[in-house]
Amino acid sequence: MLGETSLRMTVPRDALPEVLRRVTEFMGFGIYVYAVTVRPAPTELLKGFVVDLQRVEFDADSNTWKPFVERGALPGPASHGP
């Protein structure tokens, strides 16, 4: 699912370190970067966590990360038919 604009998943407590490791490893390629929020899931004894990922992009003008905005596809080469 990585590559989407936003994701929300609930993960068991024991899986949280591995999920965060995989997300940061994926971001290491530099194509997709996410702001990550982790909060306790509505379960007893912290048995799970909700992980929210929001795709962001760096804005050089303000020197900060901002939510990613889809700009649409670039037009491809004109089709001339067979």
Image: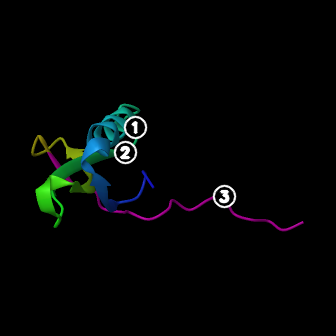
Depth check: 27 or 52 in front? 52
Tag of residue 26: 1
Residue contact at pointers 2 and 1, CB within 8 angstroms: yes
| 2 or 1: mark nearer the eye | 1
Q: In the rendering, at what x and y percent does residue 52 appear? A: 24, 57
Q: How many marks?
A: 3
Kindly identify the residue that appears in the image at 28 percent across and 42 percent down: 14
Above-or-below relation of 60 to 43: above
Is 5 included in the stretch rendered in magenta? no
Separation of marks 2 and 1 at Cα, in angstroms: 8 Å
What amino acid is found at the position of numbered circle 3 in the picture?
Pro
- Magenta span includes 76: yes
Q: Looking at the image, is mark 2 or mark 3 nearer the viewer?
A: 2
Label 3 sits on residue: 77
Which kind of residue does numbered mark 2 sit on? Answer: Tyr
Q: Residue at x 84, y 68 (%)?
A: 81
Where is residue 28? Give x, y as percent: 36, 31
Query: Label 2 vs label 3: CA separation?
Result: 26 Å
Secondary structure under tag 2 reads loop
Mark number, residue 32: 2
